[in-house]
Amino acid sequence: MLTIESLSAGYGEAQVLREVSLNVTEGEVVTLVGRNGAGKTTLLRCLMGLHRQQTGRIEFLGRDLGRIPTHHRARSGLGWVPDDRGIYATLSVTEHLTLARPTGPDPWPLSRIYDTFPVLHERRRFPGTRLSGGEQQMLAMARVLRMGARMLVCDEPTEGLAPLLVQRIGDIIRDVKAHGHTVLLVEQNVHFAASVADRHYLLAEGGIAEELDNTEVRRRESELLAYLGI
Amino acid sequence: MVNVIQQLFNGLVGGGFLALLALGLAVIFGMLRVVNFAHGAFYMLGAFGAYLLLTEAGVNFWLALLVVPAALAVVGMALERAFVHRLTQLDPLYNFLLTFGITLILQDLIKVRYGNQSQPYSRPALLDGSVNLGLFQYPSYQVFVLGFAIVLCLLVWLLLTRTRVGMIVRAATERPELTRSLGVDVGRWVTPVFGFGIGLAALAGVLAAPMRAVHPMMGSDLIITVFAVVVIGGLGSIFGSVVAGFGIGMAQAVGNLYVPALSQTLVFILMAVVLLWRPTGLFGREGVLT
């Protein structure tokens, strides 16, 4: 579904990504694990066309994204859930869900969104930033599902959330996967990653250092945690 | 006391102009991240447009109020397509150079024809008299200007809060990149929004023609105050610019009554105080400039 080949990118002189290659198959949940500054967010920004790639090739649903502008990438089925959750202060919860028009390949009807996230229905008239952190995270995910994303691109969705909410986000990801969506997840929480994902890429110093499966992640959990500096 | 109230009323009328100009600047800044120094020049062109239509074609005030803003909005959109949109990738210094340069060109083009003096423009016959506001008599035209400015600000408010375009403008003002990543073609709305802001400035200019001097420098005299208004209201905050517009109008008028020596500086003192107290302005949020 998604193939990234030898992707390099940077900021000015500083090279952040070096020849990164990875692939995600339809229906999979794949995580990118790595220290702060390893280039995870830059990789997602390249994928969304928000950061210029220097070399390499990104192919999504059989199409080379090369020069495709950001809004067309979104409409082709990439649903970006940014690390700061990207919630607007000047838009109500309902407006968050209608700003992203159902232009993607698989839009959820509003009724389904509200069935899955009843709290968003309760707070539908609230300005986005009045929601709690967990609610904002749900809104950010609900919004791209409403848009019709085939693939959710989530940047550290559990960061700063209480354990109960982390569990809830995990349930949502498993639910979304069960309904045929694909998820690319940036995650520092290795334990959480192993509980939702099928495969993991370890990103180190701008490149893919290792590809791991769940049993390996569980076996090497303490080693990985030490490496990630948590 | 009556004196103060009358002065406050003068301030509200003056504030109406500030609010309309600041509103246009705010939507343009929000959508393009461009500070349009040429805004005052379009205010001036609005007034001259009305004057020109009257003297050359006999077009009356009411028709000018429709035609001039629409025509200048089109000019604004052409300017945006030709030059302004190139600014997005450049250092903010170029923003200043381009829009200030446009201002100088427009002002001098008018000076070539009319010199450095004021042109007369009489009030529309319908609004030539005065009305009794209870405590004092007040020129009907000024009352009309105030009402018109308030209605316009409310209409723009409804447009921004109740329509899809308004929602896109709010979203793009707050988080342009994020908004594109949600499948919204933000670029499509940039030119119309620029034209809309210019149209508002031109409209304020037409409104100003019968009560202020129609002069090539009328815009550059006013625009400095408008920038202070936008900063006080909070850069990028549309609501803030309107509230600050009317507020500064009244503060200036009352200031004129008690400390006339400060009339030119009062707005900047207020700006400094507001910035010390709230660095993002009264209704601004952090991060608009990053």
Image (cartoon, helix red, strand yellow):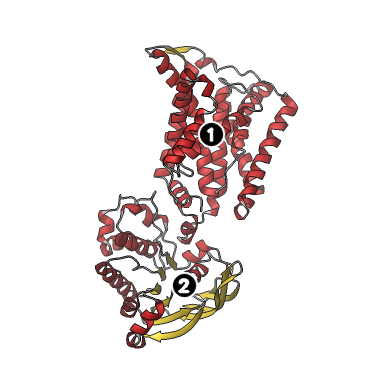
Quadrant of the rendering where the N terminus of chain B is positioned: top left
Position of residue B211 in the picture relative to residue B281 (left or right) = right
**Can residue A179 be seen?**
yes
The residue that disc 2 covers is A40
Residue marked by disc 1: B226
Give neighbour class at mark 1: few <14, some 14-19, many 20+ (Cα, 10 Å): many
Task: Say if A220 sits above or below B259 in the image.
Answer: below
Residue at the image point whose x is 61% and y is 49% from the top: B92
Give the x, y percent position of residue B216: 66, 27
Question: Viewed as shown, does residue B103 lie left or right of A210?
Answer: right
Q: Can you give x and y, in whole percent of width and height, for residue B155 in the image?
A: 43, 36
Label 2, secondary structure: give it: helix
Q: Which of B70 and A175 is in front in this view?
A: A175
Q: What residue type is labelled 1?
A: Val
Instruction: Report the side of B76 relative to A194 (left or right).
Output: right
Q: Mark 1 lies on which chain?
A: B
Observer able to see residue B233: no
Residue type highlighted by circle 2 = Lys
- Tag 2, which chain? A
Q: Residue at x 55, y 63 (%)?
A: A69
